[in-house]
Amino acid sequence: MNNAELEARLENALDPVLSSRRTVSRPARELAGLDARSQDFALRWMDVVCASNTELGYHFISLVPAALRRMTHDDVEAWVVAALDVYDRQGLFPATTALTDVDAFEAERAGHERAVRLDEESLFLQRYLRGLSGRGLAVAAGDDAHTDTETVFLPRRLSWLSRRDDNRLLYKAMATQLWAMNRFGTFRRPHEEAPALGERLAALGDTGRVSRLFYALETHRLNACIGRELPGLRREIDRLFPLPAKGRWAQAARDLVRRDADVEDTLRWVGVFLSERVETEEAAPYQGYADLDAAQRLTEQRLDADKSELQKLIQDLIDRMDRDDIDTEDDADAEVQLDFDDDGDPTHYELTLDGQPVAVPCELRERIDAILQDLQSVPEDWLSGEPGSDDGEDPVDAGELAAPAEDDPVFYYDEWDHRRGHYRKNWCALYERRVSPDDPSFFDLTLHRHHGLVLDLRRAFELLRDQQHTLRRQPEGDDIDLDAVVDAATDHHLGREVSNRLFVKTHRHERDIAVMFMVDLSGSTKGWIVDAEREALVLLCEALEVLGDRYGIYGFSGMTRKRCELFRIKRLAEPLNDDVKARIAGIGPRDYTRMGVTIRHLTRLMDEVQARTRLLITLSDGKPDDYDGYRGDYGIEDTRQALIEARNRGIHPFCITIDRQAGQYLPHMYGAVNYTVVDDVRKLPGEVSRVYCRLTR
């Protein structure tokens, strides 16, 4: 394009920000000196930037000719995408500064070959942390390495070291250090009423100095713990990042590597260093810290849930025990005790009922271990009493949130912008909320109303559970394989070696399935649709209890990217009890349908599950939509990208919808065979279970 054509093109795109003194003459003249490919590249990205902000688009087109002369097209694309990310997070002025500072971008880009991105390593790190002992931790992007006791936050990109493999090891070292904080008692309190770590550090004085001393000293202690549990990794970390200690620091380090050293020893040394005015040593590259406010809030929430669940699990254990085994007239009066070994390891304990040791079920042991990561011991009153008798929750109206937004955990997720061809970083805030329960009798009433259908579904699912396969040509079995015998006789007649695999064996198919149901609770489900969804979930739960498959149920809705909501109805490991039945009764229509962020969060939850088959099944009444423009191609493409991410992690998505127009967009999102349309909402309850039966046959 010549100068005049380019000037007309730029004026048309940038007209809102032009004036008599601000024209496009110079950018057009500079673009005219570039080749056609570079011109097309610059104009295409100008349109992309203008879609976000026209003022930013003007700055881009003014700077891009010079950028194209000094960088490749790939580098220029990375430059503008980085500026758009800054715009999304911080606004126009910082984004303009990022565009202008090309030298800083090039300096960062120079380390690209040795750099490692968290999105490349997060799946490995997630599985690595899951394989370690202690509480399962999620992995998420942050500005630096820190934890809130439930999530490990790591930098989005590491290029500090000269080799890519060393930067990968640095990610692992950071994740291990943050895991060790949770595993080896950095946040552990002596008892339930003891002050949290943040309060104890604040009581020591100068917050900045105290924090630097504490985390540096705690790193020495945790390194020793890691060395005892993961000696090979510790040697690798010491090779790359030696942590020498001199003078008073060496004395403290020798004390903190003791096997019985704990966070109390670290805090004691902080006090010593403060009184002696010891200077803080340089932090190790992998050293992390804690978001103490979030850690305290999440710990309190976790302990409340752990207390209630522990009491339920103990009561279940007592109910299952034979009265002769516990030698008490009334199971409810059984005295429950935890007796710890003298070796100082809080994970070595014995559970007794009326003084007699009993085997601890896996789920109960996991719950006790989780409590022992937050408290040094399990409070005696937690081991007895009616479950949920002191939950401290006020009743609320059906369908309303059981807790205000500030009490609900929040997660941040990227969102795919197909116009840019890149993600918007940490664009969506997702709140995981509780559903306030309604009358649990709704569950039984629904089963009674659909009595005939329930019987049909149970029979179908029982056949699925008892499914058997016939294995032929086996060395031993239940019957003779006639085809194999004929072949053996032929081989014998011809002088060949005769096989001993002459039998038929019946093999029961072992199911190893985990499924997550994602239920649309948008405002458009009001009336018949949400009633049908509730009934579908009732029938589905009843049928799945026959199979024994693990399943979770979450509803989703929200309004704008700043308030995406996910409603916990049933967690994967949660039994079908009266609480779950009451939550199913309590679900109701809410706001809009932002699907991508929900899929990403449920993928994250499913990624922590070990199963041969993992399914993500969506129940919806329409296409993706939200108040802030999340509709049309934008919403569809983000949802499609989230589904691709799920498939890449070994999760199979499927959609059940009542939208008769679904054929126009679901094949593009889910694939041609991964959805079904229910033509009548009244058929939804039965159809959901039938579809599940087909998917897992």
Image: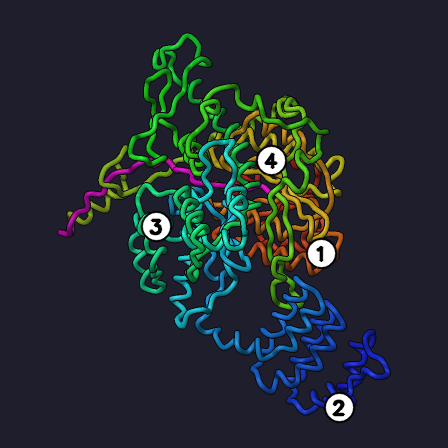
What's the mark number on residue 64? none
> What secondary structure is marked by label 2?
helix
Query: For the point 43% across and 60% down, which residue is it?
Result: 283
Asked if one can make out residue 226 in the rendered structure from this viewpoint, the answer is yes
User: Mark 2 sits on what residue?
Assistant: 3
**What amino acid type is highlighted by mark number 2?**
Asn
**N-term-proximal mark, 4 vs 3:** 3
Label 2: how many Cα within 10 Å (few below 14, some 14–19, many 20+):
some
Question: With respect to residue 326, does 37 lie above or below?
Answer: below
Whether tag 1 and tag 3 are in contact, CB under 8 A, the answer is: no
**What amino acid type is highlighted by mark number 1?**
Tyr
**N-term-proximal mark, 2 vs 4:** 2
Q: Nearer the viewer, mark 1 or mark 3?
A: 3
Question: With respect to residue 203, does 194 lie above or below?
Answer: above
Label 4: how many Cα within 10 Å (few below 14, some 14–19, many 20+):
many
How far is the residue under mark 1 from the one under mark 3?
A: 46 Å
> What secondary structure is marked by label 3?
helix
> What secondary structure is marked by label 4?
strand
Depth check, front residue: 689 or 70:
70
User: Mark 4 sits on what residue?
Assistant: 569
**N-term-proximal mark, 1 vs 3:** 3
How far is the residue under mark 4 from the one under mark 3?
A: 38 Å
Query: For the point 64% across and 73% down, which residue is it?
Result: 98
How far is the residue under mark 2 from the one under mark 1?
A: 37 Å
User: Mark 3 sits on what residue?
Assistant: 226
What's the mark number on residue 630? 1
Residue stretch rendered in magenta on the structure: 494-519
Whether tag 4 and tag 3 are in contact, CB under 8 A, the answer is: no
